[in-house]
Image: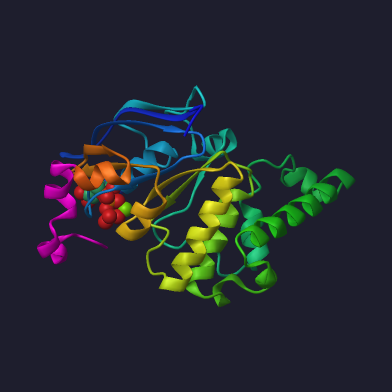
Amino acid sequence: MTNKELILSVENLTKVFGGVVAVDNVSFTINKGEIFAVIGPNGAGKTTLFNMITGVLPSSSGNVYFQGNRLTRKKPYQIAQAGVTRTFQNLEVFDNMTVIENVMTGAHITMKTNILTAGLRLPTVVNEEVQTMERALQCLEDVGIAEFAYEMADKLPYGNQRLLEIARAAISKPRLILLDEPMAGLNAEESRQLVDVILKMRADGMTFLFVEHDMETVMSISDRIVVVDNGVKIGEGTPEEIYQNPQVVAAYLGDDDEEEGVAYA
Ligand SMILES: Nc1ncnc2c1ncn2[C@@H]1O[C@H](COP(=O)(O)OP(=O)(O)OP(=O)(O)O)[C@@H](O)[C@H]1O
Ligand SMILES: [Mg+2]
C-alpha cells in the first residue's frame, strides 16, 4: 500500500488479572484501509487486547491512540463516538427485537435524541429516527440481509446474525471495526459471504482489526498479521512473512505433520 496513513497505535499494552499477565507489553500500528489480523492459541490474550482497545477493560499499563487521540481509559461509548466499534466473540444479538431495531441500537451513540426529547416526539426527533432507520436499512443492504429487516433477529440463521452484528457495528460510521472471531461457527458459504462483506467495506474505506482462528481466511484477506502467544507478541508481518517466521511456526502454526496440535477454536 502506498501513502500509508496511521489510524491506530497500540503501545506497550499490558493487562494483568491477579497473577496472570494476559497481555504483556504488546505494541503494533495499523494503517488506514488495512485488514489487520491478530492470531494466537486459545487463551493467548486476543480478546483481552480487544477489550482494552475498545474500553471494555481498563489496561494495566500502556496506551492506545486512534487518529492521534488517546483512547486509554475512555469509556466504550466514547471510543465508539471516536470511530472505533466492534463485534464480540459470542453472538450479542437482541432476540426480542427485529433485525432493523438491532442495527438501530448501534446508532444511538451518535444520535442527538435523548430520553427527554424522544418522549416529546419533536419533529427533529422524528426526523432523526427516520434517518436512522434509513441508514440501518442501508447497512443491512451492505451486508446483504436487508430482506430480513423486519423479522425477529433470533429467527435469522446464525451466519446472518453475524452479518447483523457487523451492520450494527457499521451504522455509527466508524473508521475502524474490530471483529472477534467473525468466522466462528459459520459454514463455508457463510464464511465466503462474510469475507465478501469485509472486502467490500474495505474497498469503501473501512479499516479492520480482527481475531480469527480460521487460518485460510486470515492468510487470504489480511494485509498484516500479529501473532500473540501467552500474552506476548511473537511475530508480525505479511501472511508470507508469518508463514516463514520460525518462532511463529514453532509456537502456533506447527509443521504439516502436526496440524492437529494447533489450538483452533
Ligand atoms: N476477566 C478476566 N478475569 C481473569 N482472567 C481473565 C479474564 N479474561 C481473560 N482472562 C484470562 O486471560 C487470558 C487471555 O484470555 P483471552 O480471552 O484474552 O484469550 P483469547 O486469546 O481471546 O482466547 P480464545 O482464542 O480462546 O478466545 C486467559 O488466561 C484467560 O483465562
Ligand atoms: Mg477470545
Magenta segment: does it hold 262? yes
From the top left corner, tell me how far across and down residue 206 is, in percent: 56, 43
Is residue 214 at all visible to an observer of this figure? no
Rendered position, 140 above or below 44: below
Residue drawn at 24 percent across, 49 percent down: 40
The residue positioned 13% from the left and 43% from the top of the image is 246
Q: Taken as a whole, is the magenta stretch helix, strand or loop? A: helix
Q: In which quarter of the image is the C terminus?
A: bottom left
Q: Nearer the viewer, residue 77 or 174?
A: 174
Please state the horizontal and vertical placement of residue 35, each as a whole percent of the image. Answer: 44, 44
Q: Tally the numbered discs.
A: 0
Residue at left offset 52%, top offset 35%: 79
Residue 2 falls left or right of residue 183: right
Q: Is residue 64 above or below residue 247?
A: above
Horizontally, residue 128 falls left or right of residue 141, namely right
Q: Is residue 264 magenta?
A: yes
Left or right of 232, for residue 132: right
In the rendered structure, the answer to whether residue 188 lies left or right of residue 133 reads: left
Foreground residue, 122 or 37?
Answer: 37
Question: Which quadrant of the structure image shows residue 236?
Answer: top left
Image height of 255 relative to 57, above or below: below
Q: Which residue lies furthest to the right in this view?
A: 123
| Magenta range | 245-265
x, y percent for residue 83: 57, 37
Whole-percent x, y for residue 239 in the image: 31, 46
